[in-house]
Amino acid sequence: MVNIDNLSVHSFDIIGDIAILQIPKGMEKKSKKMALEIIKKNKNVKTVYARGKFRGRLRKHDVKFIYGINKAETIYKESSCLMKLNVKTCYFSPRLSHDRLDIAKQVKNHENILVMFSGIAPYGLVLGKKSKAKKIYCVELSKEATKYALDNVKLNKIKNIEVIQGDVKRICPKFKQKNVLFDRIIMARPQLKDSFLKEAFIVAKKNSIIHFYDFLFTDEIEEGYKKIENEAKKSKKKYKILGIKKIRDIGPRKYHLRFDIKMLN
Ligand SMILES: C[S@@+](CC[C@H](N)C(=O)[O-])C[C@H]1O[C@@H](n2cnc3c(N)ncnc32)[C@H](O)[C@@H]1O
């Protein structure tokens, strides 16, 4: 947290040597002052951006440069993994670090895991380092994020990760054709309309665990359950919900939630 003119600025992320700052409404003129304060208090920070919107299917981040070295590539460290990325062209959130570790702790020996929407591969890397999974497939649409994911797998010398560039809608039926099914499927999906549950059900089997993420207001939780129920019905799948976990706040009364689903057929 930093203090500028008696206003506490605590909404910023540090990704490697880059800070991404939420400029409070009406404080735009003070953004450089805030950036300087962040750099002063965090000696490793070399660059400060203002947070923007994540846009389109590839979730590119509309950040605006404020101060420091004008660059967008950095290396971030989490759970003993090095993660290289470009903060403008790749989606990444350090706020999901606890979720990645939480899932890694649930993984049993020799699991076959699918990470859909894998980005620069943060879930894959943490699971690769912190679990005894047999094989982890990471599927990502963006060529740029895939390039970083491949670099990151090498950088961390993890041997049981395969990174595939492509659309999960096209890749999942291919897995099924080759009889590759998964013990665990992680769906850290983009905040878009499509649930992609149909694709997850294609590659799930009896006792698979699906971690399905949704973005809901407190009074919409029922809709999350309904979404899963409707898609399961269409795919003739039976399941039970093991739990629902709040991952983080994403706005007033709006949450990023994780539904843990166990398949019964
Ligand atoms: C919210 S980001 C999550 C990235 C990563 N899981 C993480 O936590 O950093 C969603 C990712 O899904 C990718 N994506 C969007 N649609 C996709 C699709 N149909 N198939 C595969 N990846 C997709 C985007 O390019 C983006 O990198």
Image: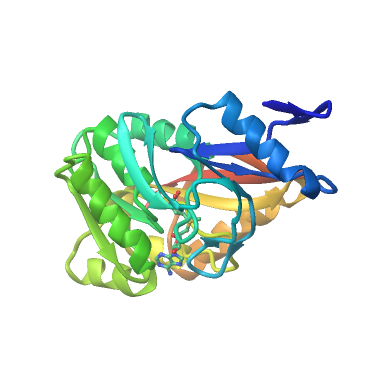
Where, by quadrant of the figure, is residue 76 drawn?
top left
Which residue is found at the position 53% from the left and 50% from the top? Answer: 213
* Residue 177, image x, y percentages: 21, 72
The front one of 155 and 126 is 155
Could you say where residue 174 lies in the image, as x and y percent from the top left? 24, 72
Query: Is 34 displayed left or right of 138 in the figure?
Result: right
Report x, y in % for residue 170.
33, 75
In which quadrant is the C terminus drawn? Answer: bottom left
Q: Determine the residue positioned at 49% across, 51% down.
A: 212
Q: Residue furthest left?
A: 159
Q: Is residue 107 left or right of residue 48?
A: left
Image position of 63 with respect to 252: above or below:
below
Residue found 59% across the figure and 27% down from its top: 40
Q: Give how far across and how far down residue 198 sits, in percent.
A: 44, 67
In the figure, residue 132 lies in which quadrant? top left
Q: Is residue 43 above or below residue 214?
A: above
Name the quadrant of the N terminus: top right
Viewer can see residue 243: no
Q: Residue at x 50, y 52 (%)?
A: 70
Residue 98 visible in the picture: yes
| Residue placed most toward the observer, 142 or 64 | 64
**Relative vertical location of residue 154 with respect to residue 116 in this rendering, above or below:** above
Left or right of 71 on screen, residue 61: right
Pick the front one: 75 or 240? 75
Q: Report the image quarter containing ligand 1.
A: bottom left
